[in-house]
Structures are given as structure tokens and as C-alpha cells.
Amino acid sequence: MGIIEKMRLDGKKIFVTGGARGIGKSVAIAFAEAGADIAIVDLDIEEAKKTAKELEENNGIKSIAIQADVTNPIDVDAMIETILEAFGRLDVAFCNAGVCLNVPAEDMTFEQWKKVIDINLTGVFLTAQAAGKVMLKQGGGSIINTASMSAHIVNVPQPQCSYNASKAGVIQLTKSLAVEWASRNVRVNCISPGYIGTELTLNSPSLQPLIKQWNEMAPLHRMGRPEELQSICVYLAGDTSSFTTGSDFVIDGAFTSI
Ligand code: NAD
């Protein structure tokens, strides 16, 4: 079997949080094209249903939509139950749901701080933990978390200390889980995207004046596209990445290299 065939995900069962749109949706499309069955997990159930339907129609795989708030342990437990009922097992988790908030540190309220940490860091912990428990019992699996280049640099000029701190936490959480679970065949990696054109960035009024400035600064003079994160995630989900765990993949068009 050639390398491309070996990278396929036929029959794997995968959940994607924040899968209704943006990066999550784009990566879910790639997983489905590679042959996996997908649970689209999102707060926005209507959009999640549309995405799941699209995946089934275009790829002949099975896809379900689940409404869950990744910050709520009860929702996360129910999500796992639904996935096991529908698919019987869980091979890959893409813990990707996240939000961004640009507020100067001195003005940030406790609630604003907590919301970002809860979704971006605690949400990744809860969903990765829930996935890990199933995978440890099964004897293996692959977890992919979404960090950000903001875990590595303080990108300017927008002030976003809670976002940067939450994403730095995701990298260290990823490495901690990878070490705890390596000998039991559960791999944990993360991706650190640079600026990617999604609703999070393109539809955020506060970011509009900054996009032009980022594009001038960026070595490639453009934002990334969600599709440009697909192949790394397919690689991490599949069996050819069996020696890859505890790693963080920066996909940023060299932005953090400036
Ligand atoms: P997006 O806003 O387009 O999509 C995020 C999805 O997550 C939405 O469908 C939303 O409903 C869902 N979501 C939000 N809170 C949730 C919750 N509590 N429970 C369940 N679902 C929830 O965002 P995106 O640009 O696709 O970003 C996806 C991930 O990538 C985030 O973690 C983000 O921080 C990260 N990221 C994005 C960029 C970028 O430039 N777009 C760069 C680096 C990292």
C-alpha cells in the first residue's frame, strides 16, 4: 500500500468540536473525504446539522450533529454517550472550539477573562479528557487540539491576554496528556494556526482595521485559508503519525518567524 493510501481514515470515528463552521468544518470535510465518520459538535446546532448533512451527501460517510457546550461537563459526557451509541467507538478527537476577545488587560472583567479561559482551555481539557477515557479503554486513539500562533507570540496591536494565555495553556496541556498516555497508545498533538480567514476573524468588527495591517506584516502578505490546515490534521488523525505525539505544529506562513 502506498503512503497516500496509508494516510486514509476509512472507518475511523471522529468528533470535531466547533465543527459547524470555520477551521473545524474545513478539517471535518477533509476527515470525511478521507473516509471517516464524523460527529459535528457545536453550540450552534442548526449550522452543525447543515454541516453534517453536507458531509454525508458529498462523501457517503455517516455524520451526526450534536449540540454541546464544551465548557459544560454534563454536555461533554452526553456528547460521548451519543457518539458511542451512533458509532460504537471513538478513534480521533479534534478539540477545536474556541473564541477570541480583544480587550486591554486593565479593562478586562473577571467574566470576560473566565469566558475565554473556560472555552479555549477548560473546554479543550474536558473534551480531550472525555475522548482520552474512551481511547484508553479501547487501546488507542489520536487527539488533536487547536492552539494558536498566539501561544508563541504576542501578536500586535490587538490586546488579547486571555486568548494568548489560554492558547499557551493548550500547548502545555497537549504535552502533559501526551506524556501521560503515550505508553497506552493515545497520542495527543496540537496545531498552532496563524491568521486564518474564518468567521472568527473576517466577521469580527474589531478585527477589520487590523486585517490590512496583518497582511502587510505577514511574510506571505495574506491570511491562511482553512483548507491549508486540512492535511496536517489528516496526518495527525491517521496511523502514519504513530511516532508523533506531544508535538505542536505551527502553520502560520512564517508569521512567528518575523
Ligand atoms: P469560528 O468562530 O469560525 O468557529 C468556532 C466554532 O466554535 C463556532 O461554530 C462556534 O459556534 C463554536 N463554539 C464556540 N464556543 C463553543 C462552545 N463553548 N462549545 C461548543 N462550540 C463552541 O472560529 P475559527 O476561526 O474556525 O476557530 C477555530 C479554532 O481555531 C479556535 O480555537 C480558534 O481560537 C483557533 N484559531 C483560529 C485562528 C483564526 O485566525 N481563525 C487562528 C489561530 C487559532
Image: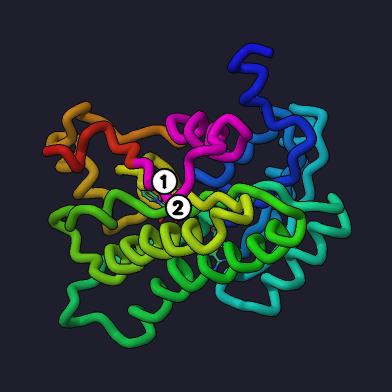
| Front residue of this view, candidates 63 and 256 | 256
The N terminus sits in image quarter: top right
Q: Label 1, label 2: how many angstroms apart (C-alpha)?
A: 5 Å
Mark number, residue 146? 2
Marks 2 and 1: in contact by CB < 8 Å?
Answer: yes
Does the magenta portion include 237? yes
The C terminus sits in image quarter: top left
**Number of numbered discs on residues:** 2
| Front residue of this view, candidates 125 and 120 | 125
- Residue 92 visible to an observer of this rendering: yes
- Secondary structure, mark 1, is strand
| Front residue of this view, candidates 204 and 169 | 169
Q: Residue at x 82, y 62 (%)?
A: 82
As drawn, the residue found furthest toward the bottom would be: 110
Q: Residue at x 62, y 25 (%)?
A: 7
Asked where in the image residue 17 lies, by quadrant, the reply is bottom right
Mark number, residue 191? 1
Determine whether 79 is above or below 33 in the image. below
Looking at the image, residue 134 sits to the left or right of residue 192; the answer is right
Residue behind label 2 places its C-beta within 8 angstroms of ligand 1: yes
Determine whether 216 is above or below 129 in the image. above
Category of crowding for the residue at label 1, using alpha-carbon neighbours closer than 10 angstroms: few (below 14), some (14–19), many (at least 20): many
Looking at the image, residue 12 sits to the left or right of residue 236; the answer is right
Residue 122 location, x and y as percent? Answer: 48, 73
* Amino acid type of the residue that numbered disc 1 sits on in the rendered structure: Ile
Looking at the image, residue 28 sits to the left or right of residue 209; the answer is right
Does the magenta portion include 194? no
Q: Which residues are magenta?
A: 227-249
